[in-house]
Image (cartoon, rainbow, N blue to C red):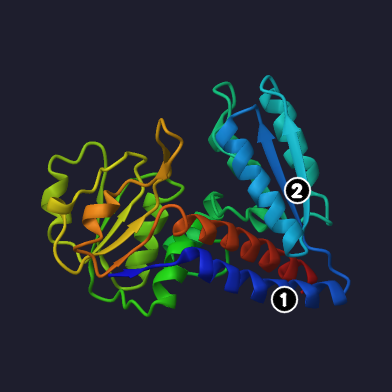
C-alpha cells in the first residue's frame, strides 16, 4: 500500500507557484485573492484563515471580507460587483455554506468567470464539460487529478466510482475522470446498492461527508482510494469517509485524512489565482 501524500506534493507545487508569482511581481503584477465570509461558521472561519495564511506565505495578497450573519443578499452582491471591476483583484472566492436567506447559485453566478478561481461559474463549468482548459477548474477535483498524476496512476480504462454528486466535488470530479479516459459511475444517497458498484471498482473517490461510509468488505484487492471527506469526531479527531485502518490493507494506493486531498485543494486555489493574474497581465 502506498500513501498518496497530498501534503508533500502541495508543498512542492506551492514552491513552484511562488517562483511564478515572483516573476509576475517583477513585471509589476501583485497577485490578489479576495475571500468573502458571511457569518460565523467555525469550519468556514478555519478554511478562510488557512487560505489567507497560504496566500501570505507564498506572496499572494489576501483580502478577507468578514460579513455579519445578517448581511443581506443585495449587500453581498454589491461587494462582489465592486470586486469584479477592481483590476487589482484577480480571484474572488465566496466561502460556502452561506446563510439560508442568501441564494447561493445567484451569488456564485454573480462572480465574473475570469475571477472565479473556485471554478463554480456556469461558464467555467461549461469549459470543463467541453474538455477545454480555457477556464478555471474546481480546486478539490483538480487537486485529486494532480495527485493521481504525480503518482503516475494511468486513468485510461479504469472502472471508477465517485461517491457524492455535489457541484463542488462529485460532478466535476466525474467529468475530469471522463475527460481522462476513465469509465465513471456516480453514486449518491439514493443509490440502491453502493456495494454493488464499489466492489468492482479500480478507483473509488469518496466525497459524501459520512464517517466509515467505505468499508473493507466493499472494495477489492488493489483498489485505489481517494478520501475527500472531512469529519470531526466527538473526541476532536479529524477523519474521512473511509474506514482507513481496514480499507488500507486492501488498497494499492490510498489518501490519508488529514494530509491527503485537503492540502492539494489549497494549492490549486493558489494556482488558479496566479493563473488569473497571468491572464490579466497578458
Q: How many marks?
A: 2
Please tell me whether mark 1 sits on a helix, a strand or a loop: helix
Q: Position of residue 76 (x, y in %)?
A: 71, 32
Q: Position of residue 23 (x, y in %)?
A: 79, 78
Residue at 39%, 58% (x, y): give it: 256
Residue at 69%, 39% (x, y): give it: 36
Q: Which mark is residue 61?
A: none
Which image quadrant: the N terminus?
A: bottom left
Residue that carries the numbered disc 1 in the rendered image: 20
Q: Is residue 267 left or right of residue 176?
A: right
Q: Which mark is residue 84?
A: 2
Residue at 40%, 44% (x, y): give it: 166
Residue at 58%, 25% (x, y): give it: 99
How crowded pointer 2 is (Cα within 10 Å; few <14, some 14-19, many 20+) is rated as many
Tell which of 129 and 20 is nearer to you. 20
- Which comes before the other along the chain, label 1 or label 2? 1
Tell which of 161 and 232 is nearer to you. 232
- Residue 255 appears in which quarter of the rendering? bottom left
Tell which of 168 and 152 is nearer to you. 152
Q: Position of residue 229 (x, y in %)?
A: 39, 47
Rendered position, 53 above or below 276: above
Please tell me whether mark 2 sits on a helix, a strand or a loop: helix
Amino acid at each position: 500500500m502506498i500513501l498518496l501524500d497530498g501534503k508533500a506534493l502541495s508543498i512542492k507545487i506551492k514552491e513552484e507557484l511562488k517562483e511564478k508569482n515572483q516573476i509576475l511581481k517583477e513585471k509589476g503584477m501583485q497577485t490578489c485573492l479576495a475571500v468573502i465570509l458571511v457569518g460565523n461558521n467555525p469550519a468556514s472561519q478555519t478554511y478562510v484563515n488557512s487560505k489567507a495564511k497560504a496566500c501570505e506565505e507564498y506572496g499572494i495578497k489576501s483580502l478577507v471580507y468578514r460579513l455579519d450573519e445578517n448581511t443581506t443578499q443585495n449587500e453581498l452582491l454589491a461587494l462582489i460587483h465592486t470586486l469584479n471591476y477592481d483590476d487589482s483583484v484577480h480571484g474572488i472566492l465566496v466561502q460556502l455554506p452561506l446563510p439560508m436567506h442568501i441564494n447561493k447559485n445567484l451569488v456564485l453566478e454573480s462572480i465574473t468567470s475570469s475571477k472565479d478561481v473556485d471554478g463554480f461559474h456556469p461558464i467555467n463549468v461549461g469549459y470543463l464539460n467541453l474538455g477545454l482548459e480555457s477556464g478555471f477548474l474546481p480546486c478539490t477535483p483538480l487537486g485529486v487529478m494532480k495527485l493521481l498524476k504525480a503518482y503516475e496512476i494511468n486513468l485510461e480504462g479504469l472502472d471508477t466510482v465517485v461517491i457524492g454528486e455535489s457541484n463542488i466535488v462529485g460532478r466535476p470530479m466525474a467529468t475530469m475522470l471522463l475527460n481522462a479516459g476513465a469509465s465513471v459511475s456516480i453514486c449518491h444517497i439514493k443509490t440502491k446498492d453502493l456495494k454493488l458498484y464499489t466492489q468492482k471498482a479500480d478507483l473509488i473517490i469518496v466525497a459524501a461527508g459520512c464517517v466509515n461510509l467505505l468499508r473493507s468488505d466493499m472494495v477489492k484487492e488493489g483498489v485505489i482510494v481517494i478520501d475527500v471527506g472531512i469529519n470531526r469526531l466527538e473526541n476532536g479527531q479529524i477523519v474521512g469517509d473511509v474506514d482507513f485502518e481496514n480499507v488500507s490493507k486492501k488498497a494499492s494506493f490510498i489518501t490519508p485524512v488529514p494530509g491527503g486531498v485537503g492540502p492539494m485543494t489549497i494549492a490549486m486555489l493558489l494556482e488558479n489565482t496566479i493563473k488569473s493574474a497571468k491572464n490579466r497581465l497578458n
